[in-house]
Image (tube, rainbow, N blue to C red):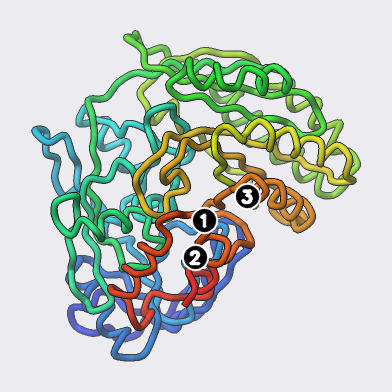
Amino acid sequence: MGTTTAAGTAGSGSARTASSPWRNWAGNVTSRPVREVSPASAEELAEAVRRAAADGLRVKTVGTGHSFTSIAATDGVLIRPGLLTGIRRIDREAMTVTVESGTPLKRLNVALAREGLSLTNMGDIMEQTVAGATSTGTHGTGRESASIAAQIRELELVTASGELLTCSEKENPEVFAAARIGLGALGVVTAITFAVEPVFLLTAREEPMTFDRVTSEFDALHAENEHFEFYWFPHTDNCNTKRNNRSAGPAAPPGRISGWVEDEFLSNGVFQLACSLGRAVPPVIPSIAKVSSRALSARTYTDIPYKVFTSPRRVRFLEMEYALPREAAVAALRELKAMVERSPLKVSFPVEVRTAPADDIALSTASGRETAYIAVHLYKGTPHHGYFTAVERIMTAHGGRPHWGKVHTRDAAYLSEAYPRFAEFTALRDRLDPDRLFANDYLRRVLGD
């Protein structure tokens, strides 16, 4: 993003007058902040927050822009945490790592692996910053292991008053209960302490399976595997399943050529061309889906966690994801398939299904209930309103909770019914940010004002 340099306030980090709009990764959200700040320490960030409050400007922090909602958009001060990176400390006795909030997950994963350590679970991409990923509830799939935010043991944030607050189960526990997935509404996260464990091996087994088989065996597949997920290709009866389980080894990563063919050539290169063709000529999408759903073959490989959990995602898209009670997932998915088959919709992206155990975070999509996630995607630039509206109607009928960082139309009235601890979160927000320094249009819609 192009900027022009302006004089910064002493001690407030690098401040710039924004000269061009900020855009998210998918390109569907744009905002024009008055200025940008790149603090190099928690103290500089706190000073930037105090200065914004004095100037009557709202404050938002942006990571890598991987949210599809306008959760990070602001017309006030945009904080870029690019200088707040790196590991502060590793505590091998407590088995924790404390990391600066702007650290990309990719850098954290590589650094931990060098130290013989790993997070227990993670999402399927690792481009996001640790604060951005946790604040929006980024998750992978797991029978017992939950989202990235559920692995937080302590966090540090700057509140609207400019105070640097540390919270954990023992210190400011009521803030900790909510701020692990804080939506940027409670303050600006400056550091996160994660639970870690000795690095381990996972064996991934990828296998094609029919839609009827995977849905009829869903409960068993979930119960039998530590991490189970699958993708259904619309306009077909084909799915691709993935089972990740801990292994005694030895490591047996995908071959360099076969791995490149599967993960880059087919999943990114050929898929990009197929999506571009489908957007230009929608009637060919069902035929492309039948071919692409058969292109990925069965394979098994064993490697360290981040090399198994995550994959490169270079094809840009829009996404909607809903968290349902796990027992509702199969019915909702069958309704979604029937809806696509009877409609004129042409859907080029597979539908992704994952699971998570219940957790105790106030606004976690898995808060208080065993959860299944159903995610739908459309290629960037494809009209999405009809498809996403129809999907959302199905998901909300099953008590679905939308992912905070993905496209949805829900508001505070709906969400206050979907989350038993919603009022707990908003009361804490009233206490920590009574003047709504960290508000924007998205938070006004989903949390009320």
Name the kind of residue labelled 3 in the image. Answer: Glu
Which residue is drawn at the image coordinates 57% and 57% (left, top)? 68
The secondary structure type at the circle numbered 3 is strand
Q: Is residue 20 above or below residue 104?
A: below
Identify which residue, 381 or 185, lies in the foreground. 185
Instruction: Give the quadrant of residue 247.
Output: top left
Residue that carries the numbered disc 3 in the rendered image: 319
Name the kind of residue labelled 2 in the image. Answer: Ile
Which residue is drawn at the image coordinates 20% and 66% (left, top)? 42
> Badge 3: how crowded within 10 Å, few (<14), some, or many (20+)?
many
Name the kind of residue labelled 1 in the image. Answer: Gly
Q: Position of residue 6 (x, y in %)?
A: 35, 85
Q: Position of residue 335 (x, y in %)?
A: 75, 37
Identify which residue, 347 or 443, lies in the foreground. 443
Which disc number belongs to residue 405? 1
Q: Is residue 39 above or below residue 350?
A: below
Residue that carries the numbered disc 2 in the rendered image: 71
Q: Earlier in the sequence, mark 1 or mark 3?
A: 3
Question: Are the residues flagged by discs 1 and 2 in contact, CB closer than 8 Å?
Answer: yes
> Badge 2: how crowded within 10 Å, few (<14), some, or many (20+)?
many
Q: Is residue 219 above or below residue 120?
A: above
Q: Is residue 24 above or below residue 94?
A: below
Residue at the far left: name it.
93
In the figure, is residue 18 to the left or right of 262? Answer: left
